[in-house]
Amino acid sequence: MAVDRELPTDEAKALLDLAHDLAVNELAPKAAAYEERGEFPRDVFRLVGEAGLLGLAYDEEYGGGGQPYEVYLQVLEELAAGWAAVALGISVHTLSCYPVAAFGTDEQKARWLPDMLGGSLVGAYCLSEAHAGSDAGSLSARAVRDGDAYVLTGTKAWVTHGGVADYYNVFCRTSDDAKRGISLLLADASTPGLVPQPPEKKMALRSSPTAQIVLDGARVDADRLIGAEGEGLRIALSALDGGRLGISAVATGVAQAALDAATAYARERKQFGRRIADFQGVSFLLADMATAVEASRALYLSAARRRDAGKPYGPQASMAKLYCTDAAMRVTTDAVQVFGGYGYTTEFPVERYMREVKVMQIFEGTNQIQRMVIGRHLAADPS
């Protein structure tokens, strides 16, 4: 069902209406088949790009939508209700645009942002490694300066869009300095020596490929260094707060879809001569699910509005990511319960929703890491 939203402008309302229509008419009908085949929906990304939804949070000067983050996130939520992998892909693509938009030179912005934001290019973010997931500062892939280029060696892991992206934000070690030893290079997908590996075999989100990227002497021009050398970790960490809000919105969208499916089923399904929605056990379950979805939306929007106002929002982003993904896991699990045995079959989408949100408790920083971030904030000296 359509969500009753408070939006800042008529333009924002039109964008949400467009996103809702795309989710219902274009995304939801295709999701199950693409997920079963494990096929990346490039055609859908072109459609979303043509609709102007790939660069909503960025400046209009470079082809973005110039929308506040609270609007962008609600668009993500609507799209996630139709197809989680597509909304996740948009969130990752938005994350991949951030380094150039926030830290790039004017020449770099003019060179790359229009195609990034217009949907001609799909991006990826190469931060994690097999032994450096939550601990981003311990990554070991290296970039060594050689004349007018850097030579990259190592392996990046858990790269969303690995093998289908047009460009990769590659975080590499340029020195052994503990705090300023990591730099960021924007590598074209066609770079010799940049070798995507076969996609991981995943529980869900199979239409969103996740793969390792092997860097075998990949040579990247020095003018593709984003920010200063040694500034990579600061760029990565500043980008993650926005990415965590993206995942919060995606998780909320999937939870909303699960709630809608469970509510519709409970109204129609009859046992003992009554709709199961009229039994207190089911009714209370639906009530808890609805409350969790509303609370999730309120929490991520509160953090987004802090971001839009220029206020610090890191702890709030971690709270949103923690709560929204945990809540989505509970909501989708309860949706399967409402469907009973049918919920355990692929005849209905709720089993897929449950599988999809599980990973949202893991990526963009596990929920244990979010608790660490929040706890450190609370323990810090306020002076």
Image (cartoon, rainbow, N blue to C red):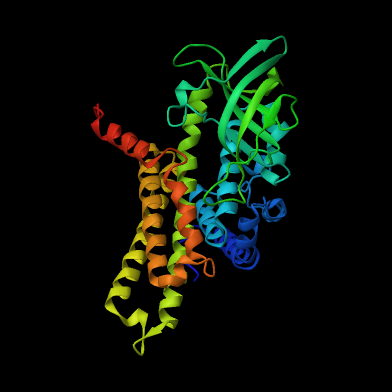
Whether residue 4 appears in this view of the structure is no
- Decide if residue 375 is on the left or right side of residue 328: left
Residue 252 location, quadrant:
bottom left
Looking at this view, is 129 or 189 the one in front?
Answer: 129
* Direction bottom: furthest residue: 273
- The answer to whether residue 28 is above or below residue 172 is below
- The answer to whether residue 180 is above or below residue 314 is above
Q: Residue at x 62, y 37 (%)?
A: 124
Where residue 145 sits: x, y (%)? 65, 11
Whether residue 35 appears in this view of the structure is yes
Q: Residue at x 48, y 16 (%)?
A: 180
Q: How many marks?
A: 0
- Decide if residue 258 is on the left or right side of residue 127: left
Where residue 239 sits: x, y (%)? 50, 34
Q: Residue at x 35, y 60 (%)?
A: 292
Looking at this view, is 255 or 69 the one in front?
Answer: 255
- Decide if residue 295 is on the left or right side of residue 352: left
Looking at this view, is 258 or 93 the one in front?
Answer: 258
Looking at this view, is 113 or 362 the one in front?
Answer: 362
- The answer to whether residue 64 is above or below residue 175 is below
Image quarter (top left, top right, bottom left or bottom right) of the C terminus: top left
* Direction top: furthest residue: 147
Where residue 167 sits: x, y (%)? 68, 34
Residue 19 location, quadrant:
bottom right
Where residue 265 sits: x, y (%)? 45, 76
